[in-house]
Amino acid sequence: MALLFKSDIDRPDAWIPALRHALPDMEVRDWPDRGDPADIAYALVWKPPHGYLKSLPNLKAILSIGAGIDHLTGDPELPRDKPLVRMVEPGLTAGMTEYVVMQSLFHHRRMLDYRDMQARKDWTELQPVAPWQRRIGVMGLGELGADAVERLVHLRFDVAGWSRSRKNLPGVACFAGAADLPTFLKRTDILVCLLPLTEETEGILNAETFAQLPRGACLINVGRGEHLVEADLLAALDSGQLDSATLDVFRTEPLPADSPLWAHPRVVVTPHVASMTIPQTAAEAVARAIHTLERGGTPPGTVDLSRGY
Ligand code: NDP
Ligand code: OXD
């Protein structure tokens, strides 16, 4: 029984030893040396070639190296009868919370304005806003969103969250479902998208959504590029409906050189690095998931393909 590791972006020299350490009784194979497909019981993957997972005759479960699973559901031949487990591990969660807090503070403290002022050698003190007067709204209160809102509450921001099912999180105004979306947006100065990409959430960051935010709001998109309608963002920035945006994810990655987002003065671009799975902590999570599956259980992060996440 073997575990296959396959990713074009995650470093095998860090992952393979971590997996072997966490799973001493299992053979761990790296993609180029995958050997007999019949041996592979578990596939730990990021963007495997379409059709490949179906070709593994004894596959027991698919484990995603990332939290998102849209890189797998796009495979028309995905073996949908096998358990699909997405990454839930403390390193990934901590990294995302750092990024959301960092970018929230960046916009809250008007760092884009100070950056422009520095270029002009302009020594002006901008009027501060107390954190409890700054309303941050996080779309998606799952593994990542719930941790991020907890830290934002500690920083004394006025925090709200929006999810599919209603939550009860200390210090967070919780909204749920399509009916609550307008109320949630209306009270949001900094909008953070931490949703999974599904049929329901694709294109959710659009002109209609931006129009419901207070004028001069900021956007932080760390979900997926397909959540955002880029032309609507550019129009909202140009009109002043949105003040600024931080974008970590894009419809086309790498972001094409001719994208207007690269040089937009009110946009911060990062190359899909908001958070990355940490091999050491993730290998432990993978081992726990495999042990749970071997016992017939359901590990944390098991995806419900009928709802798409
Ligand atoms: P979870 O599945 O744990 O959480 C998803 C959240 O979104 C849940 O709160 C869920 O609601 C909510 N949600 C889903 N669909 C809807 C909907 N239609 N309307 C309202 N709320 C909805 O995912 P994670 O928190 O682990 O990850 C979220 C996403 O973050 C990933 O799918 C990935 O796209 C992105 N990501 C980006 C990274 C980056 O570096 N940029 C790194 C890691 C992840 P409910 O709680 O009711 O189910
Ligand atoms: C993820 C990602 O889904 O890195 O984990 O985007």
Image: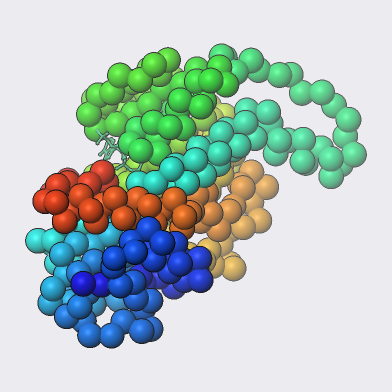
Indicate left or right for 275 with 119 as reference.
left
| Residue 153 visible to the viewer | yes
Identify the residue shown where x is 22% and y is 85%.
Answer: 36
Indicate left or right for 291 with 191 as reference.
left
Counting from the top left corner in percent of width and height, residue 221 is at: 47, 44
In this view of the protein, which residue sits in the foreground, 120 or 131?
131
In this view of the protein, which residue sits in the foreground, 308 or 206?
308
Indicate left or right for 28 with 277 as reference.
left
Query: Which image quadrant: the N terminus?
Result: bottom left
Counting from the top left corner in percent of width and height, residue 16 is at: 43, 69
Counting from the top left corner in percent of width and height, residue 32 is at: 38, 83
Identify the residue shown where x is 52% and y is 25%.
Answer: 152
Counting from the top left corner in percent of width and height, residue 136 is at: 49, 25
Identify the residue shown where x is 46% and y is 58%.
Answer: 279
**In the image, is residue 72 above or below residue 35?**
above
Identify the residue shown where x is 35% and y is 38%.
Answer: 143
In this view of the protein, which residue sits in the foreground, 44 or 106?
44
| Residue 220 visible to the viewer | no
Q: Quadrant of residue 263?
A: bottom right
**In the image, is residue 274 above or below residue 160?**
below
